[in-house]
Image: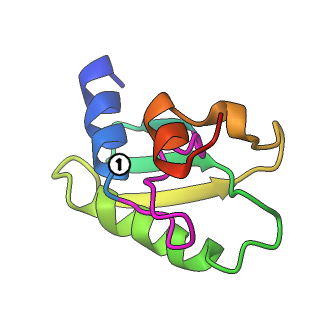
Amino acid sequence: MDKEMEESMMGALENVIDPELGIDIVNLGLVYGVNLDEDGNAGVEMTLTSMGCPMGPQIVDSVKQALAELPEVKDTEVNIVWNPPWDKDKMSRYAKIALGVS
């Protein structure tokens, strides 16, 4: 997968908003990686802000919908991982300012 495709996928994922925090999952630092194979199968490795996140299934569905809008993506598999654990240091400067986190 080339850098341009990775940027397109990450751009699409910026449209996925964490319903509890109101910030997109990319700026929250929840997306650890994306890939796309030659058959159009996308993979997303990501985490959630907490193991018991009640919005997890909704966020996963939103990830699949966002990537489905890219013509190159035929199917998406989302892999939720807990290692490395998410913390506020993974957030972008934008997300920290928006949430008042230092």
Q: Quadrant of the N terminus?
A: top left
Q: Quadrant of the C terminus?
A: top right
Q: How many marks?
A: 1
Residue type (three-letter) at the residue carrying disc 1: Glu
At x 46%, y 36%, the residue is 35
User: Would you call the spot at circle 1 few (<14 residues within 10 Å), some (14-19), or many (20 or more)?
Assistant: some
What x and y, as percent, mark residue 50?
Answer: 78, 61
Is 17 situated left or right of 84 in this image? Answer: left
Q: Is residue 24 magenta?
A: yes
- Given residues 91 and 102, the one toward you in this image is 102
At x 82%, y 49%, the residue is 82
Q: Quickly name the residue at label 1.
A: 14
Q: Identify the element where label 1 is drawn.
A: loop
Question: Does residue 19 lie above or below 35 as drawn?
Answer: below
At x 43%, y 36%, the residue is 94
Q: Is residue 69 magenta?
A: no
What x and y, as percent, mark residue 22?
Answer: 46, 64
